[in-house]
Amino acid sequence: MRILITGGAGFIGSHLCDRLLSDGHEVICLDNFFTGSKNNITHHIGNSRFELIRHDIIQPILLEIDQIYHFACPASPVHYQYNPVKTTKTSVMGTINMLGLAKRVNARVMLASTSEVYGDPKVHPQTEAYWGHVNPIGSRSCYDEGKRVAETLMMDYHRQNKVDVKIIRIFNTYGPRMALNDGRVVSNFIVQALKNKPITIYGDGQQTRSFQYVTDLVEGSVKMMNINNFVGPVNLGNPDEFTIKELAEMVVDLTGSASSIKYLPLPQDDPVQRQPDISLAGKKLKWTPVIKLKDGLEKTIDYFEMLLKNSNIKDYV
Ligand code: NAD
Ligand code: UDP
């Protein structure tokens, strides 16, 4: 198949490029390089089944493709809040453009939605049936509400125009190729620990997240894309839940770091707890994550160690 990956030069998108090329497909990687990097995909340059396009998805594009993995959108709060109007445009106009393209060339399109559609959840763990608890006017809204509208657009193009759509709701995912300046918790803590700088815990560190290693997500995404008669939404995440303080301690331990812990104010609307209920993914996709947090962290630490050794950029975090 010929497959389009929007956000293909980003953290998750680049792992999808690897997987789909190794499965023998033709891959078109589309990115505006806002948070993505050519370094994530240069190893594919020269492969005749790989094409790279610099393009911003808020503008329409016409390509002949069979499937679209629609992953373009900044995902770290630091980056999606940098230009919040642009973030909403990326989710809304970008998704309309991808749905219009899918409709025109009769392609299957899958949206990378997020656990953020559940907001600061009042139901725990979160099932797909939960409608969420989202502040529509806060500093996270450009991302949360943007993705909620993107989901609405997916379902309306499906009902109104019979577009073949899929929705995955991704929970916190980490791994190699997160950017040094990504700003999310796993990369921040690892880079801080490797530099023996203070680990920045926001709030008291008792808030929880459930961390999924990137290859587990890629496996779930590919399964979801290729199953028939199931639109979703489906949660893809690892249900092992940790407090942010536990994560900090684990990273310090695994890196053997001399870092101390520094407590900083909690950002607005920071969700208190988050854990996916993945029974639907288990039932429909026969999928379950297999990488334990400690093992995934070790691989990610190795990546950042290598990056810091070869990098001139010393003071991001
Ligand atoms: P990322 O920031 O590394 O990747 C996003 C990619 O999209 C980047 O390459 C960026 O340059 C590109 N992009 C952004 N705006 C664009 C635009 N207007 N036009 C073209 N390209 C654009 O983030 P990620 O963690 O790899 O996330 C990928 C997708 O998965 C996002 O849609 C995100 O919302 C979703 N997601 C990720 C997580 C996670 O924990 N990593 C959780 C939930 C959802
Ligand atoms: N966080 C933290 N220190 C950091 C970065 C994040 O304590 O340096 C916290 C953040 O406040 C949140 C959790 O870690 O409670 C996860 O944050 P992240 O930005 O990774 O993802 P999200 O909040 O979108 O789940």
Image (tube, grey):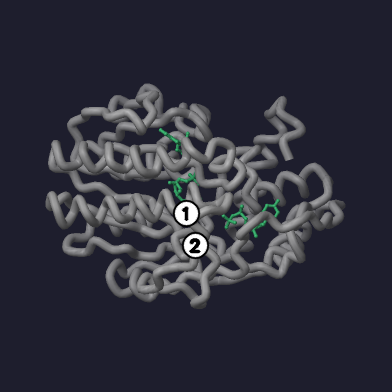
Q: Position of residue 280 (x, y in %)?
A: 34, 73
Q: Image quarter for residue 48?
A: top left
Q: Quadrant of ligand 2?
A: bottom right
Disc 2 residue type?
Val
Q: Position of residue 154 (x, y in %)?
A: 26, 52
Q: Is mark 1 within 8 Å of ligand 2?
A: no
Image point 69% across, 41% down: which residue? 305
- The mark tally for this picture is 2
Mark 2 or mark 1, earlier in chain: 2
Q: Image quarter for residue 279?
A: bottom left
Disc 1 residue type?
Asp
Task: Tell me the number on the disc at residue 144.
Answer: 1
94 shown above or below 152:
above
Q: Nearer the viewer, residue 14 or 294?
A: 14
Decide: few, some or many residues near mark 2? Use Cα within 10 Å; few <14, some 14-19, many ≥20: many
Image quadrant occupied by the N terminus? top left
Secondary structure under tag 1 reads helix
Image point 69% across, 28% down: which residue? 311
Decide: few, some or many residues near mark 1? Use Cα within 10 Å; few <14, some 14-19, many ≥20: many
Q: Nearer the viewer, residue 207 or 92?
A: 92
Secondary structure under tag 2 reads loop
Q: Position of residue 224 (x, y in %)?
A: 29, 58
Q: Is residue 77 left or right of residue 7?
A: right
